[in-house]
Amino acid sequence: MTIKPILIHPDPRLKKVAEPVAEIDEALQRLAEDMLETMYDAPGIGLAAPQLGLSTRLLVMDCAKDEGARPHPYAMFNPEVVWQSDDINVHEEGCLSIPETFAEVTRPAEVVVRWTDPSGEAMEDRFKGLWATCVQHEIDHLEGKLFIDYLKPLKRQLITRKMQKLKRERARAAS
């Protein structure tokens, strides 16, 4: 497995709608494994292919964070929300593409998601709480949407400037 570099906002590839996966082959199965490895290494609880610069409708997530909890990874190809609750949940979200930045985002408290797993099997599950927030956040990435897009314009601009500065500092340090 390979840990891949994660794009940092602003990057135009993060704003593009990802292409559907027609057929899951060994390369895509390997990509899902690499994405899980990259997510765990970051460390994070979710990662979408566009965050690696890939226009592929694939996300991975694992919100089992409690002390001693066994990992419960998901790899979802072509995920879609097929039902959402009227109840809402406000959760402080962060993003591996917007490091060290958090903001409260309001989303449906529960969702039912349909997807294809790495073996090609059709799946459907209901997610609540942090799991619901995470899967919606990652599906947003597949639609070219970031969690900061839910914020007021001024706050979004401040975060974008902070990320531009971070990218400049990282580029200087690398050269």
Image (cartoon, rainbow, N blue to C red):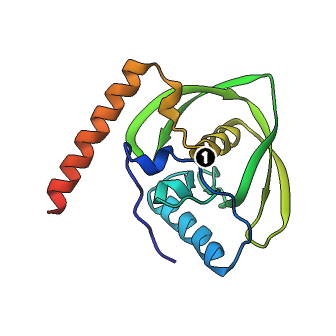
Q: What residue is shown at x 74% (from left), y 71% (from top)?
A: 23
Between 36 and 148, the residue placed more toward the observer is 148
| Residue 98 percent location from the top left of the image | 40, 42
Label 1's element? Answer: helix
The correct choice, above or below, for 29 with respect to 126 in the image is below
Q: Position of residue 36 (x, y in %)?
A: 57, 64
Instruction: Classify residue 3 by image quadrant.
Output: bottom left
Give the labeled residue for mark 1: 138
Q: Work out which quarter of the rendered image holds the C terminus and state it.
A: bottom left
Q: Residue at x 56, y 51 (%)?
A: 45
On screen, residue 84 versus residue 133, left or right, reads: right
Is disc 1 surrounded by few (<14), some (14 to 19) or many (20+) residues within 10 Å? many
Residue 4, image x, y percentages: 44, 67
**Could you tell me which residue is drawn at 84 percent across and 58 percent down?**
123
Q: Residue furthest bottom?
A: 26
User: Quadrant of residue 141 in the image?
Assistant: top right
Q: Nearer the viewer, residue 61 or 80?
A: 80
Nearer the observer, 36 or 49: 49
Q: Amino acid at mark 1?
A: Glu
Q: How many numbered badges does the structure rendering display?
A: 1
Horizontally, residue 65 falls left or right of residue 72, namely left
Q: Is residue 24 left or right of residue 40?
A: right
Residue at 66% x, 28% y is: 107
- Above or below residue 112? Residue 155 is above
